[in-house]
Image (tube, rainbow, N blue to C red):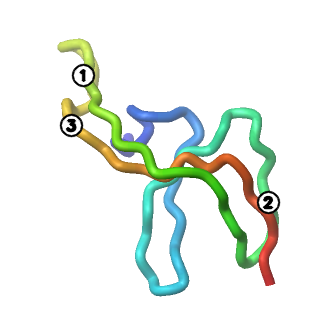
Amino acid sequence: MDPLSCYCFNAGYLTLENGEEIPVCLKTDQEEVACAKIRVEGRFISRVNRPEPSSPCPAEEKRYFQVERMTCHN
């Protein structure tokens, strides 16, 4: 299980042009964009996870990009 799934249901990693990977969360109703390069709009969010004792999720703070909109980019 990827720890990012403890913060959002539809999660993944986006590789920037410089090779850096950033964690991203998509809206659950967001459609997939099928292109080689995409442009994303949204905002960074820092959230503290305080799971139940039986949860496999770690108690930590995570910073991720909440995607509000995706479009193909040439």
Among the 4 quarters of the image, the one containing residue 38: bottom right
In this rendering, position of residue 71 left or right of residue 50: right
At which x and y percent is residue 7?
42, 34
How crowded is the residue under tag 3: few (<14 C-alpha within 10 Å), some, or many (20+)? few
Q: Quadrant of residue 72?
A: bottom right
Do the residues under discs 1 and 3 have CB atoms within 8 angstroms?
Answer: no
Quarter of the image containing the N terminus?
A: top left
Decide: is 72 above or below 48: below
Q: Position of residue 10 (x, y in %)?
A: 59, 40
Q: Are marks 2 and 1 in contact (CB under 8 Å)?
A: no
Residue located 62% across and 50% down the image? 67
Q: Residue at x 39, y 32 (%)?
A: 6
The x, y position of residue 43, in whole percent, is 53, 51
Q: Which residue is mark 1?
A: 50
- Is disc 2 placed on a helix, strand or loop? loop
Judge by depth and name the residue closer to the eye, 61 or 12.
61
Q: For label 1, count other residues whose C-alpha is less than 10 Å away and answer few (under 14), some (14-19) or many (20+).
A: few
Query: What amino acid is found at the position of numbered circle 3 in the picture?
Result: Glu
Q: Earlier in the sequence, mark 2 or mark 1?
A: 2
Q: CA distance from mark 1 to mark 3?
A: 7 Å
Q: Residue at x 26, y 20 (%)?
A: 51
Q: CA distance from mark 2 to mark 3?
A: 31 Å
Instruction: Give the residue displayed 70% in from the left and 69% down from the top.
Output: 39
Considering the image in quadrants, where does the C terminus appear? bottom right
Judge the density around disc 2: few (<14), some (14-19), many (≥20) Cα neighbours within 10 Å. Answer: few
Q: Which residue is mark 3?
A: 60
In terms of sequence position, does the residue under pointer 1 or pointer 3 come before the other?
1
Q: Earlier in the sequence, mark 2 or mark 3?
A: 2
Q: Amino acid at mark 1?
A: Arg
Say how many tags the image has.
3
Q: Which residue has dot 2 on it? A: 33
